[in-house]
């Protein structure tokens, strides 16, 4: 007779462990652009490892922080920043509802 697993349900995630996730989270909300860039690189690695299944909250928050870093470093002109911020905010607002979209291609 097989024993049923009792307890926690395991979930597959892009980060190696909880410590890595917390480390990236701390750097993402740091005041230093260099630390934020490091966190954004880690999130890019997660997206490469996990693809479209990267959590929506992580993805959209990274977009907003990326805009903030580009703004603080002065690498882009004002018009480009307006477009990037607009896109990031729309994705941030739209993404939570897109997880429930029945017409999403990965659910078909």
Image (cartoon, grey):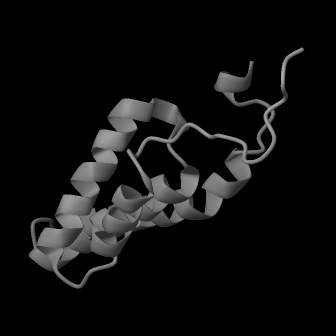
The image shows residue 84 at horizontal and vertical percentages of 34, 61
Quadrant of the image occupied by residue 87: bottom left
Name, please, the residue furthest toward the front.
Answer: 1
Locate the N terminus by quadrant: top right
Q: Is residue 77 left or right of residue 14?
A: left
Locate the C terminus by quadrant: top right
Quadrant of the image occupied by residue 25: bottom left
Q: How many labels does the image show?
A: 0
Name, please, the residue furthest toward the bottom.
Answer: 31
Q: In this view, does 39 lie to the left or right of 75?
A: right
When the figure is inspected, residue 44 is found, relative to residue 104, above or below; the finding is: below
The image shows residue 90 at horizontal and vertical percentages of 54, 61
When the figure is inspected, residue 48 is found, relative to residue 30, above or below; the finding is: above
When the figure is inspected, residue 87 is found, relative to residue 52, above or below; the finding is: below
Residue drawn at x 81%, y 33% as measured from the top left:
102
Q: Which of 52 and 75 is in front in this view?
A: 52
Residue drawn at x 44%, y 41% as measured from the top left:
14
Residue drawn at x 70%, y 30% as measured from the top left:
104
Name, please, the residue furthest toward the right.
Answer: 1
The image shows residue 64 at horizontal and vertical percentages of 39, 67
Q: Which of 17 and 76 is in front in this view?
A: 17
The image shows residue 86 at horizontal and vertical percentages of 44, 65
Residue drawn at x 56%, y 51% as measured from the top left:
56
């Amino acid at each position: 007779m097989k024993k049923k697993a009792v307890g926690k349900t395991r979930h597959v995630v892009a980060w190696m462990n909880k410590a890595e996730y917390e480390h990236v989270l701390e750097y993402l909300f740091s005041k230093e652009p260099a630390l934020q860039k490091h966190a954004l690189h880690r999130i890019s690695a997660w997206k490469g490892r996990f693809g479209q299944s990267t959590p929506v909250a992580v993805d959209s928050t990274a977009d907003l922080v990326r805009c903030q870093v580009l703004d603080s470093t002065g690498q882009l002109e004002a018009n480009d920043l307006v477009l990037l911020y607009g896109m990031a905010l729309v994705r941030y607002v739209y993404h939570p509802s897109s997880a429930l979209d029945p017409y999403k291609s990965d659910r078909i």
